Every structure is written in C-alpha cells, then in structure tokens.
Amino acid sequence: MHQPPRESELLAHIRDRSTDLHGLAGAFGEIVVGPGDDCAVIREPGGGLLLIGVDQLVEGRHYQSGTDLDLIARKAIARAVSDIAAMGGRPCWGLATGVLPASFSRGDELFDAMAKWARHWACPLIGGDIASGPAGSPLSLTVTVAGRMEGGAPLLRSGALEGDVIWLTGQIGGSFESGWHLRFEPRIDAGLAAATSGRVHAAIDLSDGLGRDAARVGVASGVRLEIEATRLPISHRSKDWLTAVSEGEDYELLLAARPRHPEVDEPPFAADPPLIGPIGCVRACREGEAPGATIVDPHGVEHDAERLGWDHGG
C-alpha cells in the first residue's frame, strides 16, 4: 500500500520545487521569501514588507473532540499569529476557512469566537470561505494571517551564524497535558524586539518540537545547532528532556543571536517573560556532518535532533 509522505519530506519537496519564486516580481510586488519559512515575505510596490502565513487546525490531530469551542477558535487564530511573531512582524489582518461536518450546528458561535480572538491580536478577519464536509468528518479550520515589519529585517530560518548562541522565549514540553497548546500567547512582542535588536540572526516558531524545528534552522542556515539537554527549560509535565523536545505544540520562539560578550550569558534583548538560555550554540558542521541540530544529553551522548519531533503528516 502506498504510504503518505512524512510532513518534513513533503515540505522539502515543495521548497525544492519553489526556488524559482525568489525575486519573482509583478503587480503584487516582489517575492522575497517563498515556501520554507514560517511565513512568505512580499516586498510591496511601495517598498514595505508584507508577511503572510497560513495554518490549519484539524479535529483529532491538533485538538480532541469535546474541546471548548472558544479554545478551538483561539488556537486556530493563535497558530497563524505565532508564525508572524517568529518572523518579527506585527499581525494586521486575517482570512479564515472552515470545513464543517454536516452535523455541526454551531457555526455562528464558532465564527464569533474566531472573530473575537482575531481582533484580540489586532488582525481582524476580513474574509474567508465555508464548506460542508460529509457526516463524521472532522472539523477543519484554516487561518491566513498577514503582518508587517515595524523595523529591521524579517527573521528567517536561514540566518543562523557560527558563534551564535541559542535562546528560547519560554519552557518546552507538556503542552497537551497542561492545555498550553490551547491557551498559549503568541510571542509578538518578543519577535518585534528580536527583529530590531540587531543581534538576532534567525528564529523559528516551535510547533513541531524543539528537536525537529532546531534542525530546520540548521539545515536552512548550513550550520549545526548544538543544544545541551541540561540547559533546557523543561515543563514539569514532561518526564524527561527527550519527551520535551519531541512533543511539539510549544509555540515558543527559538532564537539564534550574536553574543554581546562571549564570556557573558546576556540575552540579546529584554523580554517579558525573560528569555531563557543560552541553551546551546551554533557551530560549523564537522567533516562529513550534514547541517541540522544536535542535542547533547546529560551523559554527553549526541542525538540527531531532526528525528525528535512531531510530524503532522504521520
């Protein structure tokens, strides 16, 4: 039987087949960043940078049946807003689509809740589409959010440099057990500060687990992120570091930043809550080693981080 591709493999295929989009220009402006990052980046005819990100929320995959409808609506909006934050932008408007099961009778309530949360993060819903799914199908929501840069350049996965140190905006692990995956606060202010700090070179939104997402930064940047498990801020709801880096749905930001002084662990900017770290560093790949990320466990054993994470396509 034909097996569906893993999410990471499909994303790599899309990225590889889209390289000719870079620099493509037209009435819409110019494509600065296409598939392969948290958001696409368009340079508008007037010179401004527009960030566009899209995320899906599927019942049974991203939340369980019976979850409070307001929390479902909140997460649907927040996931897309978090991608804007990871690029260092401010959200400004959104679009939403929904595939509603034939038996679903709470469409008005769902829209009202989504509209409320979109306004909460200053990206009002300005349009969308609704379709009816077959009986028994899961509720599925797709939200697109656009944002703008308020200063600095977009934070890309490809910007990490040898010698950078790695920071997090919060703890990892236990997101499903604690309900954090439904109640997280997108790190908009931290992203804005990172983009204008002059010291942050790369960022990513941790949705698929710190392991897999750190590896994505390393691959995109052509370097190796080396993370120390003993320095990770692990939720008490995770049994160990291995579980914490693999679970996903943390929605914190991972940042690669130039240290102010090599001997001083000083964050690249002030944040509320404060940044956590450094949890590791960025180094050149060793001979025969591919770009990606390594996690060094408490016993000094190195683990390939790309294998540690959540795959939406699995």
Image (cartoon, helix red, strand yellow):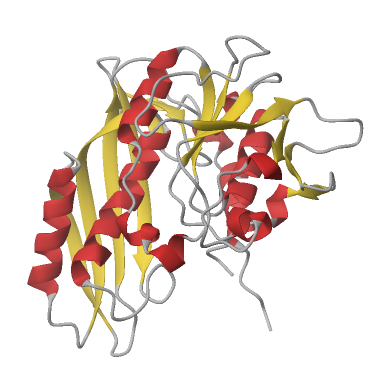
Q: Is residue 197 visible?
A: yes
Q: Is residue 42 visible?
A: no
Residue at 67% x, 78% y: name it: 2
Q: Is residue 147 left or right of residue 257?
A: left
Q: Which corner quadrant holds the C terminus?
A: bottom right
Residue toward you, 116 or 172: 172
Q: Which corner quadrant holds the N terminus?
A: bottom right
Q: Position of residue 35 (x, y in %)?
A: 50, 41
Compared to residue 295, the image places residue 96 above or below, namely below
Q: Quadrant of residue 3?
A: bottom right
Q: Residue furthest top?
A: 261
Residue at 46% x, 41% y: name it: 170
Q: Position of residue 129 (x, y in %)?
A: 19, 62
Q: Is residue 143 left or right of residue 3?
A: left
Residue at 59% x, 56% y: name it: 244
Compared to residue 56, the image places residue 190 above or below, namely above
Q: Is residue 238 left or right of residue 162?
A: left
Residue toward you, 161 or 93: 161
Q: Quadrant of residue 214?
A: top right
Compared to residue 231, the image places residue 244 above or below, namely below
Q: Position of residue 115 (x, y in %)?
A: 12, 54
Q: Position of residue 58 (x, y in %)?
A: 37, 69
Q: Quadrant of residue 49?
A: top left
Q: Residue furthest right?
A: 287
Residue at 70% x, 27% y: name it: 282
